Image (tube, rainbow, N blue to C red):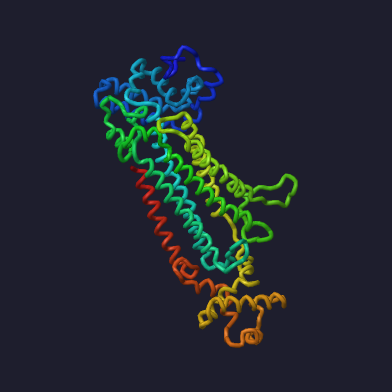
């Protein structure tokens, strides 16, 4: 079968080399976008007179039929093709004959693949934002149900200060909001249409690039043909955004893994998101949370892979760039899968509120509150910190928690200060006292702000998808 590029060659491509360079199987992800770009290109060629009206109509109609039939209809043909461009053109030849060869006028595979990938990515950004919003909504719903339910806050994996489960879940909401912002940036990075740049220098044919950009939903054509075919920043941005998203999901997944252990016992994952052991009948394993944690590594590796590929390339298209799509497709698919899994886990998780509360009431999680109480009475905070540190040391020697100290014992240890220790150390009172913007004491206002932002994000995503 004749190749798209073999006119000047006397020798057939080595069979191993041919198979090594083929990308058609992975390219089929771009089926819809590849053909849509070709349809608009054909319509534009008809508008500027490069194709006759009948030729443009025949090609457009045939491409529309090929797209509707799907890649399955050309599966046998695909086995012989180098890439998706080759496949679509051959399928078009089968339907309209020699005029299929006119479709490639004024374009190259270099600008065509960039345009198809940009278009595909713009659409996936909207879909991914929708799925991020769904997980955010699940987090807000659970947070609203547990705004006042105590949970230890940790630093260095040591109990630090009492917070609430609602406050903790809201932290994950805001983390995901940055992922929404990153995906919007990625979509903006794909806002210029590459088609019409040709191989690297534009073309002598009178293309209407503004028409093509508008018809495909781009804001404008790209500015420089050489930069256009060289550019894979938008792919790197997308893979980086996915890596950050997976890193965030991995952190939540790790908390589920940790907190579902008997040692913590804060949460029980639903059986639909757990597995058992083939040998130990009692086991309920958080396998899917662990898999999310593991697959985040693949997303991170994909970003590293593309950056390493691009770092040494001179301007112009280089075949190395063909390897941008496997990591892009995998990272996006991982993002979709992990988001949907995590939404299910968050929605169905059962929290052990009594155990969480008990973990806040023992030990020394109120130490900061006690130091703050002394500082509020005029003691320099550094001195208050040292006083409370000494108090903790004495409690440890006696095997006591701070809450175990009686008023008389406290007066003996802190003779100059009359403090209602139980009131100061009450975890709920500590949570309520931290009224600074973003603190535990204003969690209801934070929930309201999050609801408003989520509503705006969802409405914005709907508007973008209609565009």
Seen in the picture, residue 168 relative to 188 is either above or below; the reply is: below
Who's the residue at 73% across and 49% down the image? Answer: 281
Seen in the picture, residue 283 relative to 266 is either above or below; the reply is: above
Left or right, residue 398 beside residue 244: right
Left or right, residue 213 beside residue 331: left
Location of residue 163 (image quadrant): bottom right
Name the residue furthest right. Answer: 279
Q: Position of residue 399 (x, y in %)?
A: 72, 75
Left or right, residue 435 beside residue 367: left
Q: Position of residue 393 (x, y in %)?
A: 67, 76
Seen in the picture, residue 124 relative to 368 is either above or below; the reply is: above
Front-lying residue, 453 or 405: 405
Who's the residue at 59% across and 63% down the image? Answer: 155
Q: Position of residue 17 (x, y in %)?
A: 54, 21
- What is the total number of numbered labels drawn onto the structure image? 0
Who's the residue at 42% across and 40% down the image? Answer: 233
Left or right, residue 235 beside residue 38: right
Seen in the picture, residue 392 relative to 197 is either above or below; the reply is: below
> What is the quadrant of the C terminus in the image?
top left
Q: Position of residue 58 (x, y in %)?
A: 32, 21
């Amino acid at each position: 079968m004749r190749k798209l590029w073999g006119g000047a060659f006397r020798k057939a491509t080595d069979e191993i080399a041919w198979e090594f360079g083929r990308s058609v199987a992975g390219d089929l992800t771009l089926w819809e976008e590849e053909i849509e770009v070709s349809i608009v290109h054909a319509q534009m060629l008809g508008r500027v007179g490069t194709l006759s009206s009948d030729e443009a109509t025949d090609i457009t109609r045939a491409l529309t039929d090929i797209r509707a039939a799907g890649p399955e209809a050309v599966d046998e043909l695909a086995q012989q093709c180098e890439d998706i461009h080759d496949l679509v053109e051959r399928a078009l030849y089968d339907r309209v004959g020699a005029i299929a060869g006119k479709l490639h006028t004024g374009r190259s595979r270099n600008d065509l693949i960039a345009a198809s990938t940009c278009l595909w990515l713009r659409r996936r950004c909207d879909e991914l934002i929708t799925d991020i919003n769904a997980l955010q909504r699940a987090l807000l719903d659970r947070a609203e149900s547990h705004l006042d339910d105590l949970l230890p806050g940790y630093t260095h994996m040591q109990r630090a200060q009492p917070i609430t489960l609602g406050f903790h879940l809201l932290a994950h909401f805001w983390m995901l909001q940055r992922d929404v912002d990153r995906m919007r940036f990625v979509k903006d990075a794909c806002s210029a249409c590459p088609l019409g740049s040709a191989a690297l220098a534009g073309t002598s044919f009178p293309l209407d690039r503004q028409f093509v950009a508008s018809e495909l939903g781009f804001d404008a054509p790209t500015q420089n043909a050489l930069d256009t075919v060289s550019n894979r920043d938008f792919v790197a941005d997308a893979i980086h955004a996915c890596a950050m998203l997976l890193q965030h999901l991995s952190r939540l997944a790790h908390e589920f893994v940790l907190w579902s252990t008997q040692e913590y016992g804060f949460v029980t994952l639903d059986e639909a998101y757990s597995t058992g052991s083939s040998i130990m009948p009692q086991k309920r394993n958080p396998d899917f949370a662990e898999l999310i944690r593991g697959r985040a590594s693949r997303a991170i590796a994909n970003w590293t892979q593309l950056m390493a590929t691009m770092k040494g390339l001179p301007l112009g298209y280089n075949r190395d760039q063909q390897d941008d799509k496997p990591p892009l497709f995998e990272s996006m698919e991982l993002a979709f899968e992990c988001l949907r899994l995590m939404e299910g886990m968050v929605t169905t998780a059962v929290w052990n509120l009594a155990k969480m509360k008990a973990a806040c009431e023992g030990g020394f999680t109120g130490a900061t509150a006690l130091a703050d109480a002394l500082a509020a009475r005029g003691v320099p905070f550094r001195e208050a910190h040292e006083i409370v540190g000494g108090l903790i040391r004495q409690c440890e020697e006696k095997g006591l928690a701070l809450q175990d100290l009686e008023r008389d014992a406290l007066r003996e240890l802190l003779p100059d200060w009359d403090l209602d220790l139980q009131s100061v150390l009450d975890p709920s009172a500590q949570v309520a006292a931290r009224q600074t913007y973003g603190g535990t004491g204003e969690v209801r206002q934070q929930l309201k702000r999050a609801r408003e932002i989520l509503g705006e994000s969802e409405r914005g995503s709907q508007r973008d998808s209609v565009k």
